[in-house]
Amino acid sequence: MDSIRVALLGHGTVGSSLHQLLVEHREHVRAATQRDVEVTAVLVRDVDRARPGLDPTTTLVTDSLEELLASKPDVVCEAMGGIEPTREYLLALLDRGIPVVTANKQLVARHGTELFARAAAARTQLRFEASVCGAVPIVRMLRESLAATRIECLLGILNGTTNYMLSAMAANGTSYADALATAQDLGYAEPDPTEDVEGIDAAAKLSILAGIAFGTTVDVDDVRTTGISGVTADDVAHAHVLGARIKLVARAERLLAPGGGHTIALDVTPMLVPERHPLAAISGATNAVLVDGAPFGQLVVQGAGAGGPETASALAGDLVSVLGSEPSFLTSDPHVAHLAVAPRDARSERHYVRMRVADRPGVLAAVAGALAAHGVSIERVIQQRAEGADGTGASEASLVLTTHPCAPGDLETALATVESADRTVLPMLDAPEAAS
Ligand code: NAP
Ligand code: HSE
């Protein structure tokens, strides 16, 4: 039986889990591939650190790509993260015709086109299932299972850290800071949690998924991105009163362009998701993706979106796929067209607004007047006394309102004329239509 030599770039949370999986599930891998798969080389930063499960007398442990190349790997699995030198390393591997499997969403999102081109030129493969939604096989579902369909909209909870945090804030009234500390302790957060909480991680994942779903080049900087750092425990509680949950939703939608044809609207933003919506029930570090299109209707997939073993299972699946296939249209650059990005106000939707205002006659009328002047219609109003900045509780009110569908720009212009503090504005997702 042939033996396959696998090299790992990175032996941290994900890389060490992949190594362990390939050892513990050796029989499953052999049954699937009819080959023995051996980890023969590992690239790390610190070669002197002792690492459980890694024996440097039998496996090359190096910080040099040249040494790793000299070990003649058949396939390389990348779980070191970052853009450079990772990009440079992957290009060197692909140029030599060595297939690469990666978990690196930022690299695929920002440099996918270059990497795919070099893989194609060398007649080899770049696989990236593990870069989006951990264990959930969403890349394969979009690329293969739904390849002959027309996708209209993709909605996702693509970041486990923020979903864990928002779930904890909703379940226990936990503060934002405490929820973040626990998510970091549990190992969900990226080394720098800014990528998670500011939506940067989810935007990279959305650009990868949207690129496949719509077959279009997507510049990750075209994803309008708002994180959850402005969401307070108050907002989470108010959402509950309104029959909704706050979720960091990644959304890619095909819209009709005014002059004909289509554009694509791309955003990552906290949204009020009605309790009846399939994404409202996704809690903890779970990821989920809802795909809507024809002729299949709606599909929802969910599962563990982060964590070493979970992500390793997706890397190992891609490794098996590489061993069982030749480079083809299924492994080449999925971006075959270019859809223009829709302007922000291309879509009208309902909004939630919470603000702290002075509790005196005429304030509510002034807010209503400002909104009316910009064509924004109020759907619902809740006003509660708020403890004033001076602690007296007499002078301020927390004003929560929801709007009928309006363009976000009109709402923003209207609110700019209103005097208020501590303001949150979030779009609201519509409930799914009831089955007739
Ligand atoms: P990690 O624990 O920080 O591990 C990174 C590994 O890469 C370490 O072994 C590190 O070496 C090595 N490394 C980093 N820079 C290097 C360099 N310049 N040269 C040589 N080795 C280098 O990170 P991780 O959480 O496993 O994440 C790895 C990748 O998987 C990232 O792209 C991440 O976005 C992605 N991912 C992670 C998760 C997750 O749940 N953690 C889920 C999905 C995708 P040392 O050990 O010597 O420091
Ligand atoms: N930090 C990421 C998350 C890990 O929380 O989803 C998976 O990419």
Image (tube, rainbow, N blue to C red):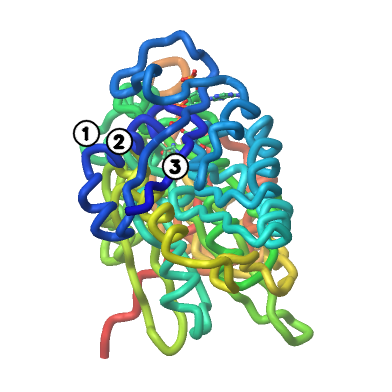
State the separation of the CA atoms marked 2 and 1: 6 Å
Query: In percent of the image, x 42 and y 89: which residue is there?
Result: 295
Which dot, 3 or 1, sits closer to the camera? 3
Answer yes or no: disc 2 within 8 Å of ligand 2. Answer: no
Q: Indicate the position of residue 57 as horizontal and vertical percent values.
A: 38, 17
Is 118 on the left-hand or right-hand side of 2?
right
List the residue tagged with mark 3.
5
Amino acid bearing label 1: Asn
- Check disc 2: other Cα within 10 Å, few if <14, some if 14-19, many if 20+: many
Answer yes or no: disc 3 within 8 Å of ligand 1. Answer: no
State the residue in front, 137 or 188: 137
State the separation of the CA atoms marked 3 and 2: 46 Å
State the residue in front, 287 or 45: 45
Query: In percent of the image, x 47 and y 30: which residue is there?
Result: 41
Give SS at disc 3: strand
State the separation of the CA atoms marked 3 and 1: 48 Å
User: Residue at the right extreme?
Assistant: 259
Is 51 on the left-hand or right-hand side of 341?
left
Give SS at disc 2: helix
Q: Indicate the position of residue 83 as horizontal and vertical percent values.
A: 65, 35
Q: Are marks 2 and 1 in contact (CB under 8 Å)?
A: yes
Amino acid bearing label 3: Arg
Q: Indicate the position of residue 95 as horizontal and vertical percent values.
A: 70, 48
Numbered tag placed on residue 53 in the rendering = none
Query: In percent of the image, x 30 and y 48: which residue is there?
Result: 304
Using the rendered image of the protein, determine whether residue 357 is visible from the camera's viewpoint: no
Q: Indicate the position of residue 264 as horizontal and vertical percent values.
A: 65, 70
List the residue tagged with mark 2.
169
Amino acid bearing label 2: Met
Q: Considering only vertical position in the picture, is 17 above or below 282?
A: above
- Check disc 1: other Cα within 10 Å, few if <14, some if 14-19, many if 20+: few
Labels in figure, total: 3
